[in-house]
Image (cartoon, rainbow, N blue to C red):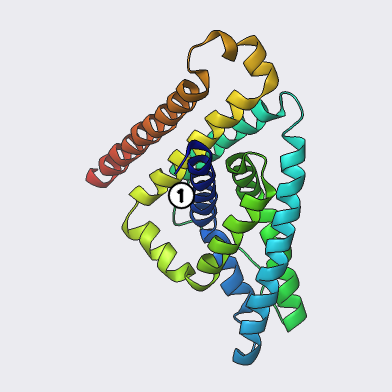
Amino acid sequence: MNLVESEVVISILSIIIIDLVLGGDNAVMIAMACKALPAEQRKKAIIFGTAGAVIMRVVLTAIALYLLKIPFLQFAGGALLVWIALKLLFEEKAAAVECDVGKSLFNAIKIIIMADVVMGIDNVLGIAGAAQGSLERVIFGLLFSVPIIVWGSTIILKWLDRYPGIVYIGAGVLAWTAGKMITKDIIIYENIGRYIPYFDFALPVVVLIFVLATGLYMNKVVKRKEVGKNSV
């Protein structure tokens, strides 16, 4: 496998991991939107709703890929991804997902699509960064990961609860993607990057270490506070 093929594989794997880790709430939302429907309509709502959500996500990601070509927006997008990665580590895992219940097949499909658009902004930005400008990688990655989210949502959510370390893997991928996005910003590169040896590798490593170290430290602080409260 040559260097180009390796970059493509890493890019697609990053898209899949980002979508799986950030897609847990979306999976719960799909289940809630369909729970009031008769059994024979649930599968149709899930299939058509998910198909519509995937199409919308591809369209939004295509727009994001175009916008990220604008100077300095790569840096802004990378900085936002760092915040999303930290938020993923600090987020309260027990937070409830609020979603309307579909009263009809069409209504449930509409809820799934609209809710996915609203809840999927972080996914879109992360996927756009990991795709490195390739819409084909976006489509392939989503076609692979979305069915897993829809039909394996319960398993994914249980894994996230049982093995918290999975969240750190997702946050790490987001942090690395954020660093790569920043290095590709033409303004950042022209004014900073070209003067620093191995800038396109060193910065993602620094961002990765910063996010994971900050997440580990802050979560330890939170646990200490919780232990202190329980001991009182």
- Is 133 left or right of 4, judged from the image as shown? right
Spot occupied by residue 165 in the image (x, y as percentages of width and height): 34, 48
Name the residue: 55% across, 70% down: 150
- Is 57 left or right of 18, judged from the image as shown? right
Spot occupied by residue 132 in the image (x, y as percentages of width and height): 62, 39
Answer above or below: position of 189 versus 169.
above
- Amino acid, disc 1: Glu
Asked whether the viewer can see residue 11, the reply is yes
Q: Quadrant of the N terminus?
A: top left
Asked whether the viewer can see residue 86, the reply is no
Answer above or below: position of 121 versus 80.
below
Q: Quadrant of the C terminus?
A: top left
User: Residue at label 1?
Assistant: 92
Name the residue: 74% across, 24% down: 71
In the image, 105 versus 32, the foreground residue is 105
Q: Residue furthest top?
A: 195
Answer above or below: position of 191 versus 6.
above
Task: Classify mark 1: helix, strand or loop.
Answer: loop
Name the residue: 74% across, 50% down: 60
- Is 3 left or right of 164, judged from the image as shown? right
In the image, 25 versus 98, the foreground residue is 25
Spot occupied by residue 55 in the image (x, y as percentages of width and height): 73, 62
Name the residue: 65% across, 33% down: 77
Spot occupied by residue 88 in the image (x, y as percentages of width and height): 49, 44
Q: Which image quadrant for residue 183?
A: top right
